Amino acid sequence: MATDRGLLVCVGDLVEDVVVWAAETARVGTDNVARVCRARGGAAANVAAFAASSGTPVRFVGRVGADLVGEALIRGLAAAGVDAKVQKQGRTGTIVILVDPQGERTMYPDRAAAAELADVPDGWLSGAGAVHLSAYSLAGPSLSVLRRASQLARSDGAVLTVDASSVALIEAIGPARFRDLIRSLRPTYLFANGVEADAGSLRDLATSGTTVVVKNGVEPTELHFDGMLSATVPVPPASDVRDTTGAGDAFAAGFLTAVLDDADAVAAVAAGHTLAQRVLAEPGAALSPKTEMNGATGD
């Protein structure tokens, strides 16, 4: 298949997020005042939608349930400008996200159908200029899909990125095996926040031809390559932080959009910061209008 240098393919989860904004510190055993919002979720689907908002041609590959929620999520991706290649079987996954008044998140994922992605046609995965994989799919039958996506990306000469996704995931798989699985995919870039990088010793992967991008909240983002820290990129201050849900996905989308426009890694990180700023004031993985934010973060 001919490669479209402008096409981004994202492989991973599409789920429903139930975001609970707590108005006060939780009181156990009684009512707590909150704002509740339902939204599209799933790290890879978020990256796809955010990148499409910047005008990048995007294809999403994943699985939802054969139910009304799944159909609505697919329609939402299509409305966002994403070419959604989605299997339908079982029940659609849900993540409950509790956000405290300081913006810190606690998540309760039930990935359901998203965790069973398998037997994906090569035509869904190939022909891209960049391919983005979510590490959530390293476990279970979806691992074979990620491996095939990696093979096709290398064959197409595409940039390949992987998001480490979760400390809990790294601990469940085991840090050593997690590193081995990432190394076997041979990504061009690996995204991780500082806690994930420490938990999995992920900076070590910078010795295997991968650039490891470590996000540190408001502190500078690190670029590790060839076994060493090769650059740091400052994070502009954020003026209004209420919910960091989706900020890392927006960072990945901004980074990938810039890479597809031939930006170098430092410029791509800066672009990631710029897009990440726009999710910090909204419930869940939703973008604020550009004029409402003037800071950035990429955690």
Image (cartoon, rainbow, N blue to C red):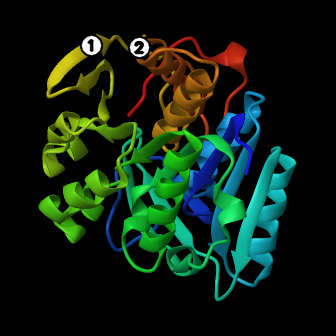
Q: Is residue 32 visible?
A: no
Q: Would you place residue 67 above or below residue 204 in this image? A: below
Mark 1: few/some/many CA within 10 Å (<14, 14-19, 20+):
some
Q: Quadrant of residue 141?
A: bottom left
Left of 119 or right of it: where is 186? left
Q: Earlier in the sequence, mark 2 or mark 1?
A: 1
Locate residue 265, reporting x and y percent.
42, 19
Q: Would you place residue 70 above or below residue 278 in this image? A: below
Q: Residue at x 69, y 48 (%)?
A: 127
Q: Quadrant of residue 289?
A: top right
**Amino acid at circle 1:** Ala
Secondary structure under badge 1? strand
Residue 196 bears which disc, if any?
none
Locate residue 157, reporting x and y percent.
54, 39
Residue 266 bears which disc, if any?
2
Q: Residue at x 41, y 39 (%)?
A: 103
Q: Is residue 96 visible?
A: yes
**Circle 1 is placed at which residue position?**
231
Which is more toward the observer, 23 or 235? 235
Locate residue 23, reporting x and y percent.
48, 47
Which is more toward the observer, 185 or 256? 185
Q: Quadrant of residue 14?
A: bottom right
Quadrant that contains the C terminus: top left
Left of 49 or right of it: where is 186? left
